[in-house]
Amino acid sequence: MSSEDLFNGQHGIFFSKGDVHIWETSLDASKELTEKCFNSLSSQEKERSTFFKFEKVQNNYVISQGILRFLLGMYLNIDADKIKLGRHTKGKPFSIDNSNLRFNMSNSGRKVVYAFSMDEEIGIDLEYSRDLDDLNELISKNFTSSEINYITKIESEKKYRFFKFWTIKESYLKAIGEGMRLPPDKLEFSVNNGKFKLQSINGLDDQDDWVFEDFNLGENYIGTLVLKNSSAKIIQHAIM
């Protein structure tokens, strides 16, 4: 989809049963498109945008939040600036216009991704793979001993495995509405033939069957979508 189609108010995107939609776009937008995003924001969101010290960070917020509103407008058949958003007690946003529509978003590097489903909680996380001077410290602080053994087992794969595990934990925390309120080292995941499974929370066995799916945004980007429907049809879109 072109950004012009998005901003010109294309409405009426529908789900088939079991569909999950992923949308991706760049945070590099023209001044005109950035203004359209800003104009779609609520008064509270506009005020929040002024709190960011650096213009680049402010624009990232305006663009990512504005595009979210235009995408919600397509699903709900409502103009972007009329979308009403609320937040659960732990901060996870939801649609007041249709609480059955679930969504989540993430950005890293110069990309932002969104996930949408109907009637099913989802979480999404994106990380731009890059060199980190404190990689070993981050691994030791955020993962359990068994996870650390997996991440560090093959030196050439350590950076990828770190970022992949990070997106696993972050997407799950976002799906359940905890964000980083639950320290990531209190979650333990196992890996079997490349498939991740939640083993325990705070040392207690977890019985929920969450499914963790990769999605591809090209070189150096690592992404994970988490959901409960193992038979869901995942459809990926791009806004150009």
Image: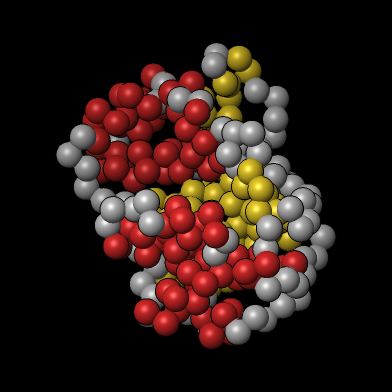
Residue 69 in the image: above or below residue 199: below
Q: Residue at x 70, y 54 (%)?
A: 95
How many marks can you see? 0
Q: Residue at x 73, y 60 (%)?
A: 19
Residue 220 in percent (x, y) is at: 33, 58
Residue 13 in percent (x, y) is at: 73, 73
Residue 77 in percent (x, y) is at: 75, 72
Is residue 105 visible in the rendered image? The answer is yes
Q: Nearer the viewer, residue 111 or 73?
A: 73
Seen in the image, is 44 located left or right of residue 83?
left
Residue 36 in the image: above or below residue 212: below
What is the quadrant of residue 117 in the picture?
A: bottom right
Seen in the image, is 202 located left or right of residue 135?
right
Residue sticking out furthest to the left: 133
What is the quadrant of residue 101 in the picture?
A: bottom right
Residue 41 in percent (x, y) is at: 54, 64
Residue 41 in the image: above or below residue 53: below
What is the quadrant of residue 133 in the picture?
A: top left
Seen in the image, is 57 located left or right of residue 90?
left
